[in-house]
Amino acid sequence: MRIVVIGSGFGGLAAAIRLRQQGHDVTIVEKRDKPGGRAYVYEMEGFTFDAGPTIITAPWLIHELFQRSGKRTEDYVSLVPIDPFYNIRFPDGSTFRYTGNRDEVIAEVRKFSPADVPGYLRFSDATEAIFEAGMALIDTPFERFTDMLKVVPDLVRLRADRSVAKFVNSHIRDPRLQQVFSFNPLLVGGNPFQSTSIYALIHTLEQKWGIWFAMGGTGALVRGLVTLFTELGGTLRLSSEVDEITVNAASRRATGVRLASGESISSDVVVSNGDVAQTYMQLVQGAVRPKNTDRRMKRKRYSMSLFVIYFGTNRTYQNVAHHEIILGPRYKELLDDIFTHKSLASDFSLYLHRPTATDPSLAPPGCDSFYVLSPVPNLAGDVDWATAAKPYRDSIMAFLEARYLPDLSKHLVIEHVIDPRNFRDDLNSYLGSAFSVEPILTQSAWFRPHNRSEDIENLYFAGAGTHPGAGLPGVLSSGKIVADLIGGELR
C-alpha cells in the first residue's frame, strides 16, 4: 500500500520504519527543514542543542527497530548510560543523587530521612507491580470500550484512581523525598498531583533499564532512524507542510494529503504524527468527523507548555551533571499555578541539561552546551509572552548565575529562547502544549484519542497525543501500534 506519514518525530519514524519493513511504499512529509519533530536540533556557532527529548529510557524499543531489519543499533548511533540519572537539588542546598544502583538510592533516602527507608522500599516494590501491569499495555491498542473493561480489574487493584503524588506520599513522609519520587510525570506533561499513579512505573522503568544518552545528542538518534528508513527504501520530504488530509466524503476514507504548496500526494493510508487536536481541527474537514469534532477536541485537557533557553558558554562548569532537576520553594502550589490557574508564577522549578558533561563534542573545545527548561502554562492562560518572555528569561538566568553557574553572564556566548508560541507556531501544537493531551486517568488508554480514527478508518495516529502517551517509550510504542493495526488489516 501507499502510505503517507505526516511528521518525522519519533512516533512517525517508528511507524514509518515498521511499515516499510512490512513492504509498504512509505513517504514521510515533514513541515520543518530537518527531521525529528520535537526532537529538532539547533546548531549555532559550533554549539549543538537538542530542542526536545534528552532522556532516553526503554532502549530495547530502539534496538527492536534496527533488529527487525537485521541491523545493529550501534552501527547507526551510540547509546551510553548516564550516571547519575539526575541530581535533584532543593532550595535548602541539599542534593539527592539519583542513580540506578538500589543501594545508592537507599543510602540517599537514609541521608535525607532515615525513617523513610522502609517506606521507600514499600514504594519501590509497589511500583514494580504497576510496571508489570502498565508495560503490558504500552503496545496494546484500545479501540473498543471492551478493551478497556479487560484492564479495569488491574486498574482497581493498583488504585489507578490515585495520583502519583498521593501514591508516593502514602509511603514517604519527608517533603523533599516526596518530590524526588513524584516529579517524573512532568517529563511526560503531567501534573504529579493529577496524573494517574500508573505513571509511577517510571521509577521501575528507570531502575531496571537505566537512562541513556545518544552520543552526538538526541538528534543523532533521529539521524540514525532516518538513515535506517531511507536504506529500507522509504522517502523523506522536508519543508513539506500538510495543508489538508483529503477525504472521500461518501466512503469517509482518506485519499491522501494536500501540501501547503498545492501539491497533492495520493495514498491508501494516512498516518499523522502531528498534534492530534490540530490534525483533526486544521487538516480534516468537519463534515467527515462527526465524533472527533472541534468541540470534543477543545474539551480535552492539555499538558503544560515549556519555556526553554538554549545557551552556550566559553568555559565549562564541572560541578553540573548531565541532568539537573532544580526544585523551587513551592511544589504543589507552583503546579497549581501552571496546570489549574494557568498563570505565570514569579518562582519556578527547572530542568538544567548539560550534555557536554557526557559528550564534549556538542560544544567548541573548552565550552559547555546547556538548555534550561521551565514548565509554564499553555496558551489557554492569559500570559502575554510578547512582554513576559524577556523578564522571565532574565530571572531564570540570574538565578542560575547566583546559585549554580557563577559568572554566567560573562561567559555566555550564544543563546536561543523558545516559549509556548513556538510550540503553537513551529510544531502546530494546540494551545502551545508541549506534550499534547494531559495524562490523567480519564484521558488514558481507551479514553485517549485512538490510534485509529473512529471517523476515518484509514487515518491513524502516532505520537504523544494518542495511546499510550508522551515520552520516548510512549511515542515509539504508538508507532508500533499503528504498524500492527495496518498490518493486521492486510492479514
Image (cartoon, grey):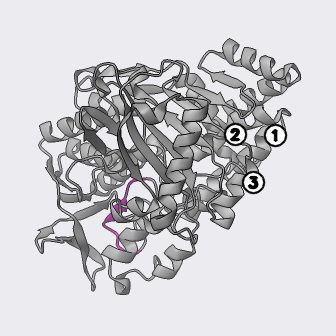
Please tell me whether mark 1 sits on a helix, a strand or a loop. Answer: helix
Q: Amino acid at mark 2?
A: Ser
Image-quadrant location for residue 301: bottom right
Q: Which residue is mark 3?
A: 333
Q: Nearer the viewer, mark 2 or mark 3?
A: 3
Q: How far is mark 1 from mark 3, CA to CA?
A: 16 Å
Give percent across and percent down for residue 441: 65, 57
Q: Amino acid at mark 1?
A: Asn
Q: Which residue is mark 2?
A: 182
N-terminal of the pair, mark 1 or mark 2, is: 1
Task: Look at the image and say whether residue 459 sits in the magenta stretch.
Answer: yes
Say if residue 210 shows up in the picture.
yes
* Up-down relation of residue 54 to residue 101 (above or below): below
* Up-down relation of residue 305 to residue 362 (above or below): below
Please tell me whether mark 2 sits on a helix, a strand or a loop. Answer: loop
Task: Give the residue drawn at x 34%, y 20%.
Answer: 360
Q: Which mark is residue 339?
A: none
Graded by Cα atoms within 10 Å as few (under 14), some (14 to 19) or many (20 or more), the crowding at tag 3 reads: few
Q: Is residue 153 left or right of residue 482?
A: right
Q: Which residue is mark 1?
A: 169
Give percent across and percent down for residue 124: 72, 27
N-terminal of the pair, mark 1 or mark 3, is: 1
Give percent across and percent down for residue 326: 62, 36
Give percent across and percent down for residue 101: 62, 15
Please tell me whether mark 3 sits on a helix, a strand or a loop. Answer: helix
* Up-down relation of residue 80 to residue 390 (above or below): above
Graded by Cα atoms within 10 Å as few (under 14), some (14 to 19) or many (20 or more), the crowding at tag 1 reads: some
Comparing 383 with 39, the one in front is: 383
Task: Give the residue drawn at x 69%, y 39%.
Answer: 182
Q: Which residues are magenta?
A: 455-463
Q: Is residue 403 left or right of residue 430?
A: right
